[in-house]
Image (spheres, grey):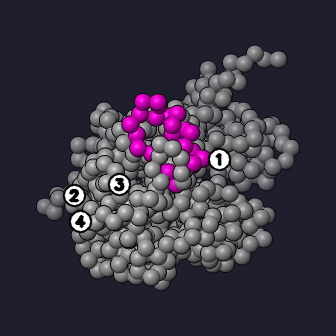
Amino acid sequence: MRTRATSCGSLAADSLSFALGGPKRSILGEHGGNGRGNMSKQSSRIIEGPKLAAQIPALTVPELIRRAARTAPAKTAIIDATSGRRESYGELEQKIARMAAGLAALGLRPGDALLLFMPNQPEWLIAGLGALAAGAVLSGANFHYGATELAHQLHAVEARFVATTPALLPTVRQAAGPHSRLTILLTGEAPGTVNLDSLLTGEAPDCSVATSPDARAALPFSSGTSGLPKGVILTHRTLVANITQIRAAQPPPESLVWLAYLPMFHIYGFTFSLYCLAVGGTLITLPRFEPGTFLEAIERYQVTHLSTVPPVLQFLAAHPLVGSRDLSSLVSIGCGAAPLGMATEQAAARRLNCKVEQGYGMTEASAVISMTYTDRPRLGSCGQLIPATEARIIDPSTQADVERGASGELWFRGPQAFVGYLNDPAGTARTITAEGWVRTGDVGHFDADGYLYITDRLKELIKVKGFQVAPAELEALLLTHPAVLDAAVIARAHERSGEVPIAFIVAREPLAAQAIKDWVAQRMVDYKHLDDVVFCDRIPKSAAGKILRRELRARDAERAASPKV
């Protein structure tokens, strides 16, 4: 996931108090070795973010948010854009405590898993934070899942409780099976379920447990763009660390109104929702991205900050519907989760007259690894490493550090790094080195000033006659063509070249495949030329906006196997 952060508000001094440390002349620098005067060639190529001047608070996620809530109990914490319902920080703090007590009375015990299977709404956060306060572990599931996919996640996390909506209840029942002992919490009424609101009316005292910051807090599942989703183990400490790092990288503005339309089951939407509440912002929940309701929410609630994914930014940059709304409240837009071309970044900034910046992160980093620091943007980059984070660029063939400016696989290390994959020690060992480096699988480079540029996924690089072709580079080019609405590039096996790039294209108007191939050939070196163009109605993407290339590869294989007419 590539992501970018915004921040606001203020926190109680004992919950998030720190300042940036380190040298004043540079935000990033080369690693200085072991301090003994002999700096190895390898360590000299480690890039470091700035120091945190204070320790990351030893708090759980609900403790962090409840302490922030007590500093401004009358302020609006959450607004449900669908109904207009509001929750103040005082009400939120009280409901977290009551939800924890209600869940404990139902039999939830520390370490139990609560699976959240619902679109974004206040209940997602209230149920989730209440469960965390009671010592439980959260796992958000994609609410578009069918029963088979949901059953896989229910089984993987060993969920004893699931929170859902009446519309999704049939899927939950089918996934759970007839003999399940799963307790179903519902945002409504139905036989065999427990109404979520009823848990808030009990008189049981606050039963928040003394949970260790190192205890499991969340089990988000990676997006599965190239294979089956994997459970990622995040602790309270890793999540609180990332919230702390984000806030340090961008000093809080006077106020923040953040639109939570990015799904909370994904790490991007989840961590930034927590972040908004941890710094005292106002969170506007929207069930999903739909152009009309999305724009209406920005205008009605005077949204100041947006976190987006490339398809949404493309919509903001080019769709005529955007011009019919007053979006002047927007101060800053961040884009992450997938590669973004500079042309789209620039077009959105010009049209909306606000900052548009990129960042980078992943589920295994609790969300963020790099972001754009205030007043230090660099077009096309993912910003710079956030505080207390280290990174290096590794040659995938030799496993050696490369020179500054050269491309390779990004490895990172920091307090936000995940613990491991759920029930997958082999996968964990392949991803986390003995020294604690996390292999991201993303290809990129750092420039001389420490700005990060991510160009593609390591496994998605197309190898043409020994040359490496990044799909994201071709996709960014294709999206500048006036007749191309969306595009995705994958590899196809080729007898002479090994692999060749082919493009799936959603066209705005009638377009000839050969015309697109010729257009690309005029702008790219020969080994990056498109071998084929396939027109389609849509590009399959995850909820976070990542192209699901495995689906395109399967579609291409089906086309190849089909009898030619």
Q: CA distance from mark 3 to mark 4?
A: 24 Å
The spot of residue 564 in percent (x, y) is 78, 17
| Sequence-earlier tag: 2 or 4 | 4
The residue at the far right in this view is: 510
- Is residue 27 visible to the viewer in this orientation of the structure? no
Which numbered disc, 3 or 1, marks the residue closer to the eye? 3
Q: Are marks 3 and 2 in contact (CB under 8 Å)?
A: no
Which numbered disc, 3 or 2, marks the residue closer to the eye? 3
Residue identified by numbered label 3: 103
Indicate left or right for 429 with 181 as reference: left
Q: Dot 4 lies on which element?
A: loop
Going by the numbered disc 1, the residue's amino acid type is: Glu
Which numbered disc, 3 or 4, marks the residue closer to the eye? 3
Give, as a single range, the part of the protein colored magenta.
166-187
Going by the numbered disc 4, the residue's amino acid type is: Ala
Q: Dot 1 lies on which element?
A: helix
Residue identified by numbered label 4: 58
Query: Does 53 appear above or below 185?
Result: below
The residue at the far left in this view is: 36
Q: CA distance from mark 3 to mark 2?
A: 19 Å
Q: Is residue 174 magenta?
A: yes
| Sequence-earlier tag: 2 or 1 | 2
Query: Does 113 appear above or below 336?
Result: above
Q: Residue at x 49, y 34 (%)?
A: 175
The spot of residue 345 in percent (x, y) is 62, 63
| Sequence-earlier tag: 3 or 2 | 3
Residue identified by numbered label 2: 212
Going by the numbered disc 3, the residue's amino acid type is: Leu
Q: Nearer the viewer, residue 42 or 228?
A: 228
- Is residue 97 visible to the viewer in this orientation of the structure? yes
Q: Residue at x 16, y 63 (%)?
A: 35
